[in-house]
Amino acid sequence: MEQTQRGERILEVAGELLLAWGYRRVTIDEIARRAKVGKGTVYLHWKTKDALLLAVVVNAKAQSLRHQLDRMRADPLEVLASRMMCGLYRDYLADPVLRAVQTDDSDILGRLNDTAKQELAELMTYGDHVLRRHLQVLRTHGLVREDVTVAHQHYAMMAVAAGFFMTEALGTGAPDSPVAPAAPEERIDILAHTLRGALEFPVAPDPDAAASAARRALAAATAAAPEIIALYEHLEERSSQEMRRQLRD
C-alpha cells in the first residue's frame, strides 16, 4: 500500500471510530488494527492521537470547501450568499463529522473541539476574512444590499446559519418533529428565503421584471465569480497547509 493511500485509510478509519465511539474511547491501537497497519505506521503519519483526530475535522471542512468550489465553478450564481450557504448546509446534513463540529457535540468530540479552536485559530480567522471579502465583492457587483454594513451582514449570515445548524442538533429538524419540515430540501429552501431577505433583494412579483432581474443577477454573478473563487482557492490551500502541518515531517 502506498504511503498516501495508507494515510487516507488511517484517516478514514479514525473518522469512523470518532463518530462511533467518541474521542475518549478512540485509541491509536484500534485505529491501527482496523486500518490493517502497525501502530508505528500511524505515528509515521501523525504525531499524536489529537493530531490525527484533528486531521479528521480539517479534512471534513476541506471536503466541504472543495464541494463549494466545484459548485461555484459550475454555476456562477453559487457565489450568491444565500446559494453558497445552502450548499454548505447540504454538506452539513450529509457529513456527520461536520454536524458534530458545528454543534460542538461533546459526546463525539470530547476536548477535540477546544483543541481545534486553538490549533485552527489562524485558519478560522482567515476563513472569516474570506467570507467578509466575499460579501464586499458581492456588494461591488450589486448582489447584496447596501443598507447595512458588511460587518453586520457577515454577522447576520453566520447567526442565521448557526441557528439552522443548532435546530438540527436539537432534534427539531428530525423527520418526526412537529416543528420543522421533514424534507431536507424544504429546510434548505427556508434557509435560502431567510438569507435572501436579510442580505439580497426581493423577487419582483411581475414575471417580466423577475426574469429581467434574474438576467442581471446572472451577469453580475458571472463577473464576480472569478475573484470570489480565487478567495476560496486560497483558503483551500491554507487548509491543505494545515493538514500538512499536522503530519510528521
Image (spheres, rainbow, N blue to C red):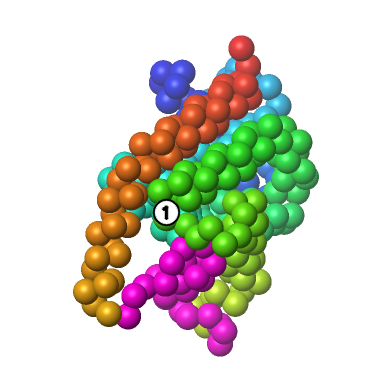
Q: Amino acid at mark 1?
A: Gly
Q: Secondary structure at mark 1?
A: loop
For residue 56, above or below residue 42? below
Side of 84 relative to 152 (left or right) = left
**Residue 42 visible in the displayed image:** no
Looking at the picture, how far across and down is residue 169, in whole percent? Answer: 63, 67
Q: Is residue 202 magenta?
A: yes
Which residue is farthest top?
A: 249
The quadrant holding residue 246 is top right
Across and down, in percent, residue 199 comes to 51, 62
Taking the view exactly as shown, the residue that stands out farthest to the bottom is: 178
In the picture provided, is 219 more to the left or to the right than 158? left
Residue drawn at (60%, 51%) of the image? 150
Say which of 34 and 155 sits in front: 155
The residue at which mark 1 appears reads as 142
Of all residues, the one furthest to the front in this rendering is 147
| Residue stretch in magenta | 177-205
Return the x and y of residue 210 as percentages of the image width and height: 28, 71
Q: Residue at left 42%, top 33%? A: 230
Q: Residues within 10 Å of mark 1 (few under 14, many from 20)?
A: some
> Can residue 203 be seen from the camera position used here?
yes
Using the image, determine if residue 165 lies above or below residue 41: below
- Taking the magenta stretch, the answer to whether it contains residue 122 is no
Nearer-the-camera pick, 249 or 193: 193
Name the quarter where the N terminus is drawn.
Answer: top left
Tell me the residue at 73%/41% (across/down).
Answer: 117
Which quadrant would the C terminus be assigned to in this image? top right
Whether residue 58 sits left or right of residue 187 in the image: it is right
Question: Which quarter of the figure has residue 96?
Answer: bottom right
Q: Residue at x 54, y 41 (%)?
A: 133
